Image (spheres, grey):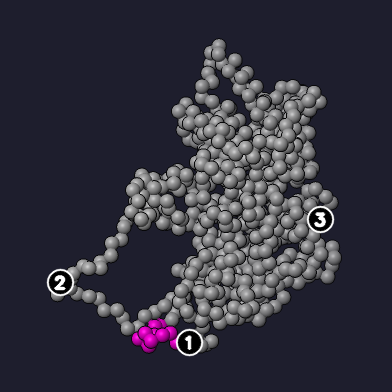
Amino acid sequence: MSPSSQTGLLATPCVPCREHHLKCDRDTPRCGRCIRAGRECKLSFKFKSSIGTKFGKDQRWLRPPRRLIYVDETRYLMAGNSPEDTPQPEFHVDDTYRNGPEPVSPRNSIPLSSDVPRSPRSDHLPAEIVSRQHTQGGDILYSRPESLVVNTRPHPQTASHRHDSSPERLQTLRPSQQDLNLHASPHENASTLQFYDAAALPLKDRTEAILFRHYIQKIAVCLDCCDPLQHFELTVPERASTCHTLLNAILAIAARHLSHTTDFDQLASNRYHDECLKYLIPMMNHSSAVADENIFAATIILRMLEEMDGSLTGQDNYSHLLGIHAFVNARDQYMVPGSLSAAAFWVGLRQEIYVAILTQQRVKLHLDDSIVDRSLEPAEDYTWSNRAIILLADILNSCFGNNPLTTRRWTALNDAAESWTRARPPSFNPFFYREATGSGAFPEIWHGSSCHILGIQHHLLAQLFLVQFDPSIPRVGPNRRTAMQKMTQRIEALMRELCGLGISNQWTPPAMFTACIGIAMFGDHFGERSDQEALAAFLKKTETAHARPTAAIQQQLMKAWGWDE
């Protein structure tokens, strides 16, 4: 029996699943994917064949033209551009093709954009074969069943960058002007200017190689906490070989991290950052840029650089965060689970959540993407961590929304938080736990996976905001004092666990930074001097060891604690 004839199943996939190119379980009245994503499930139209239909003798039929035009979009799809923005090469097809396609001469072949990595053995292969080779690298997926031959011979290559003879000055990686001229044309999309003609790896400059290695070993782990495929450690460095914006972003953040934690040149990061902006800003003016996951990943990396500069100092201008908004709010059709875009989405969501907490505003990212899962169904641990992150975002939107948080909404969110705790896998339990001793303010909580730590910490932040915004706390009256005392005790207990996770698992730096977000919001609840000193020491350690400035928060808390008096 075919699936479409099974009782209780739709005959065709629902509209949202078809629009997002996802496999639909066709369950009724709502499919499983729509339930997990929390969106409306619309029935799709079932096409019925006209085979066997009889037409009248006076039926009028359209005559197809003898000369057809085939528009090839290969170079634009592979570069992540919109073929509608620029003229496309055309093939004219007439009756001579009915007996089989004629071979295409090199003079009429379509040159693929040189910004796409090539295999030296892919010259004069059918377009369908070439497309398969490039999709293995994580590029945009497409199929081209036509057997037209495509010329993939590269343009004459030139040096992609030069190195300064002075050993003290770092040379930013950028294409030479001749390289840009090879790409540029009156109709060329600006996003194609981000690629090297020749691979930038291996690097020739040893200092730049040190920065590249530092990113892989120290920075990427902060971005891949909830990504089982480790895209920022494995995929991004590989893509950086041909994408100069991505490579300069890597070198910029590595140089900034080293300048905060060592005596590395403090101006080196600015040079790489400026080189990124030189090409990133023009590309953001094109709608096709949101289809480029390499630029999306570069924006995520540069946003992390912004966090290092002023995320906790009150001087953050959030410029790259606005770029993340543009990508996330327009990429639902490109967001495929397991892709670099999906990995960048989850990192960008965490970055947006931190800003929403510090500024006490709603999360401004679109939270109904196809990869968002709010269910409690069995899944891998990384999915459970991301569910906790989404729950925190939902709670922040309710706490900082335009309308007051109602008791009904608060109860629903609190039930969701409790359900996550009950349903999460046993692997989220620590393999070592010890209560805080007399000399320590925080418990020891040891975990073996960063995804467990980040998931639990975001869930703790969600509980902290639920406690703080509990609408059942009386605003006035004799019971208010008792309710406020219970709230403070609960907040202190959650904060001790949040900081304990950070201080006990310093091998994953995001654990420390996430705890600092909680300290910034709820540290003023601690009244004991010993606890206050422990929180202040936590903030200082995060700044010195992990390049996250916390001086402004320390000063604000000291003032709230009355240390200046």
Disc with the residue nearer the chain's start (2 vs 1): 2
Secondary structure beneath label 1: loop
Q: Give SS at disc 2.
A: loop
- Taking the view exactly as shown, the residue that stands out farthest to the front is 1
| Nearer-the-camera pick, 103 or 1 | 1
Classify residue 21 as left or right of residue 419: left
Q: Who's the residue at 58% across and 33% down the image? A: 421
Q: Residue at x 45, y 58 (%)?
A: 21
Inspect this view and state whether residue 233 appears: yes
Q: Which residue is mark 3?
A: 265
Q: In front of the other: label 3 or label 2?
A: 2
Residue contact between numbered discs 3 and 2, judged by CB atoms under 8 Å: no
The outermost residue toward the top is 478
Q: Give the vertical position of 380 relative to 149 (above or below).
A: above
Q: Earlier in the sequence, mark 3 or mark 2?
A: 2
- The magenta stretch is 92-104
Sooner in the amino-acid sequence: mark 1 or mark 3: 1
Q: Amino acid at mark 1?
A: Pro
Q: Are marks 2 and 1 in contact (CB under 8 Å)?
A: no
From the viewer's perspective, is residue 298 above or below residue 507?
below
Q: Which residue is mark 1?
A: 103
The residue located at (53%, 74%) in the rendering is: 129
- The residue labelled by disc 2 is 56
